[in-house]
Amino acid sequence: MTRYIFITGGVVSSLGKGIASAALGALLQARGFSVRLRKLDPYLNVDPGTMSPFQHGEVFVTDDGAETDLDLGHYERFTGRPCSKGDNITTGRIYQDIIAKERRGDYLGGTVQVIPHVTDAIKQFVLDGNDGVDFVLCEIGGTVGDIEALPFFEAIRQLGNELPRGATCFIHLTLMPFIPSAGEMKTKPTQHSVKELRSIGIQPDVLMCRCDRPIPVEERRKIALFCNVRETAVIQAIDVDTIYDVPYRYHLEGLDTEVLGVFGMDAPVPDLTSWQNISHVIREPEGEVTIAIVGKYTGLKDAYKSLMEALTHGGIANKVRVNIKWLESEIFEDPDQMHHLEDVNGILVPGGFGERGSEGKIAAAHFARTRAVPYLGICFGMQMAVIEAARYMAGIEKASSTEFGPQEEPLVGLMTEWMQGEELVKRGYDSDLGGTMRLGAYDAELKPGSKVAEIYGSTEISERHRHRFEVNMAYRERLEEKGLLFSGTSPDGLLPEIVELPDHPWYIGVQFHPELKSRPFDPHPLFKSFVEAALAQSRLV
């Protein structure tokens, strides 16, 4: 029998429901169970694909081309299990599907309502495709009391009654603040949050209280008493140095034991040595490097969540701490600001959209190329590196991208068609922005003997994409004559995937997003090699 765990949040958002879900999934895996993690998002957008990173953080892309919530990145990194389109749904997608059915007449003239139509759609999503899975963990976005989240809470309440007895567990994550002036921790926010949850018919089985210090025994008893849970089910979720501490810390607090107890189950004690080893390397590295991330969303670090974690994984592989220096790309449009890059061991220009900050990214690529600083350009970062090479190596002064308007020298242009399996996909400038990019995993072939072929240890790879524009292959010959090698292409040779400079210590641009496939126990080869190159560079200084 498949068992369902519903994770909800209260008091404030951003308490770490995603990390908690991922960590619990990892703990259940370590005990020998199979898990599946899903995210239910209450917002009306169909998916986060058209949302600004400042609004939502990064867009995580799955192998099958879904644009999803960033929490799915945590799920993959902690469990190693790839997510899919079926693991993230929004209110917008549910309403889109229901309205399409209504227009077709599927409801036979009946009135379409939140209950039962919307709630039934949510329940169907939760229950679909779980054959052979021991535990399905469903995280509900937002906080209890949000108007837009009410249909989701109602749906999981119904599931609690409809599924067999002992098949559901409700976990509620709340904030337990410390008030310095009073010198004590306060239980009232948690009490009120649980009261709100109970008012809509859900009694939590386990409470996770986010806090910055241990919860005194008396306060723990008070929470248990007034929230109607066992004292052992009050789990303190104390702030930690690194997210990779979380599975082990939650195990010590008894989270996995308590959850299994809700289901009347037991299992062997998990071996969490590998998680402890990772935490040890992060806390006690053998060295450190500084990587500059030159981006346009540096004001919100969640915009680069997978990137930050992939760099951490590269550091773990090399047993070094990776310090990130966040630099807004626009500052480098002023040549006098290039000194900000003088003290870094590597430069990374990530993905992005739009003209703002593009010249600064080109300047950063120029600095890395001319100063022999390791450079990794991802998606837009690769395109800017190619434009830089065209301008300053091949003498194509007006090289630019059609993303910024009509160009005399379109080094980067809109992708109008590409193969997706056996299907030819076509796009135009007037296509919708949402869900129309080259999305998901695609194969690429690497040039034998190239730097990237050496890094991957193979000439055949598969990586995840999210882009609408592509480097113009009509310029390939002119650029290769000047030393920029197109070392990776699509299997048909029509689409460029990787460029590199063979005579540079480490200078690589990739059209895909390697950070999406990096894991703490399996760091991505590119990030492993990039951090290694940064370490070598640091020793030269």
Image (cartoon, helix red, strand yellow):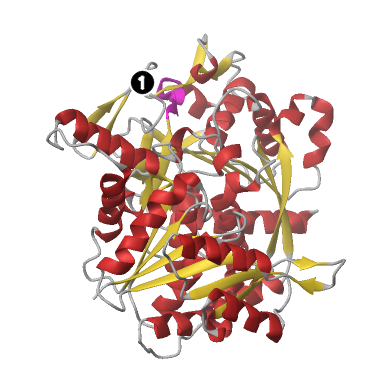
Which residue does the numbered mark 1 point to in the structure image? 431
Residue at 59% across, 44% down: 303
Which amino acid type corresponds to the residue marked 1 in the rendered image? Answer: Ser
Give how far across and how far down residue 268 sits, in percent.
40, 91
Quadrant hosting residue 108: top left
Give how far across and how far down residue 327 sits, in percent.
73, 40
Residue at 70% across, 72% down: 283
Q: Quadrant of the N terminus?
A: bottom left
Q: Is residue 409 magenta?
A: no
**Relative to 531, residue 131 above or below:** below
Q: Is residue 473 magenta?
A: yes
Relative to residue 271, is residue 89 drawn left or right? left
Relative to residue 24, is residue 126 drawn left or right? left
Q: Which residues are magenta?
A: 468-476
Give how far across and how far down residue 305 sits, in percent.
57, 51
Give how far across and how far down residue 356 sits, in percent.
64, 24
Whether residue 111 is visible, yes or no, is yes
Residue at 65% across, 47% down: 301
Q: Nearer the viewer, residue 369 or 81?
A: 81
Quadrant hosting residue 193: bottom right
**Relative to 438, residue 130 above or below:** below
In the displayed orientation, state which residue is furthest to the front. 199
For the image, the number of numbered tags is 1
Whether residue 522 is visible, yes or no, is no
In the displayed orientation, state which residue is furthest to the right. 181
Q: Nearer the viewer, residue 163 or 21?
A: 163
**Relative to 425, residue 125 above or below:** below
Q: Nearer the viewer, residue 380 or 190?
A: 190
Q: Residues within 10 Å of mark 1 (few under 14, many from 20)?
A: few
Secondary structure type for disc 1: loop
